[in-house]
Image (tube, rainbow, N blue to C red):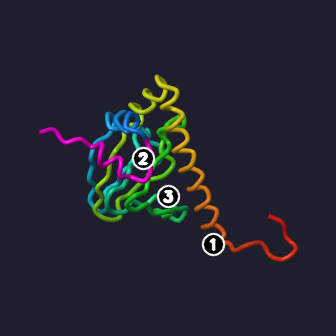
Amino acid sequence: MTTTLEPLLRQHPLFADMDDDTIHRITGCAKNVRFRSGDVVARQGEAADQFFLIREGRIALEMPAPQGGAARLQTADAGDVVGWSWLVPPYHWHFDLRAVSEVRAFSIDGRCLREKCESDPRFGYQMMKQFSTLVADRLEATRLQLLDLYGSPGPGTHP
């Protein structure tokens, strides 16, 4: 008996509202992956040929700190998506990704998905809508994080 990832992908918030044909196309680019706590999932500057849909666990987005070591910028948990660099040339990771705990995820092959987006504009548009929303949400979260870190402007100042 063959097991399909389609029902599992459909449960992920990123793809929950997509039609059967779209889920089927994505499934052709998907595989299950696991990472142990402390594993490096991706390194800044390396080719970003995939993205991850976290099913269980936590992945940290980090970058080298000026004083050495790594600065943790964000963490992603179950239900989150890690990586959109697969969609934006030159397709390189902008951060390091490290498993903070045991992680079970789907790895979606970015090259495979880009080819499907190129060959079917309707599908490509659906992917762009999903990921542009994801990017906008991440930028808003970063903005709020910066407000927490630096505070809001004082009276008489303009943003």
How far, Cα to Cα, is label 1 from label 2? Answer: 33 Å
Query: Which quadrant: the N terminus?
Result: top left
Q: Is residue 155 above or below residue 103?
A: below
Q: Which residues are magenta?
A: 1-18
Front label number (1 vs 3): 1
Q: Is residue 145 left or right of residue 114?
A: right
**In-front residue for pair 44/14:** 14
Q: Is residue 37 above or below residue 47?
A: below
Q: Return the disc, 3 or 2, that comes first in the chain's sequence.
A: 2
Front label number (3 vs 2): 2
Q: Is residue 127 left or right of residue 154?
A: left
Horizontal and vertical percent for residue 46? 43, 41
- Kindly identify which residue carries mark 3: 64
Q: Which mark is residue 149?
A: 1
Q: What amino acid is at disc 1?
A: Leu
Horizontal and vertical percent for residue 32? 27, 46
Q: Give the secondary structure at mark 1.
A: helix
Q: Return the disc, 1 or 3, that comes first in the chain's sequence.
A: 3
Identify the main secondary structure in magenta: loop
Q: Residues within 10 Å of mark 3 (few under 14, many from 20)?
A: few
Asked if the magenta segment contains residue 37, the reply would be no
How far, Cα to Cα, is label 3 from label 2? Answer: 32 Å
Q: Is residue 18 left or right of residue 39?
A: right
Q: What amino acid is at disc 2?
A: Phe
Horizontal and vertical percent for residue 9? 34, 47
Give me the residue at 48% from left, 32% from top.
Answer: 123
Q: Residues within 10 Å of mark 2 (few under 14, many from 20)?
A: some
Q: Is residue 96 above or below residue 1?
A: below
Q: Residues within 10 Å of mark 1 (few under 14, many from 20)?
A: few
Front label number (1 vs 2): 2
- Kindly identify which residue carries mark 2: 15
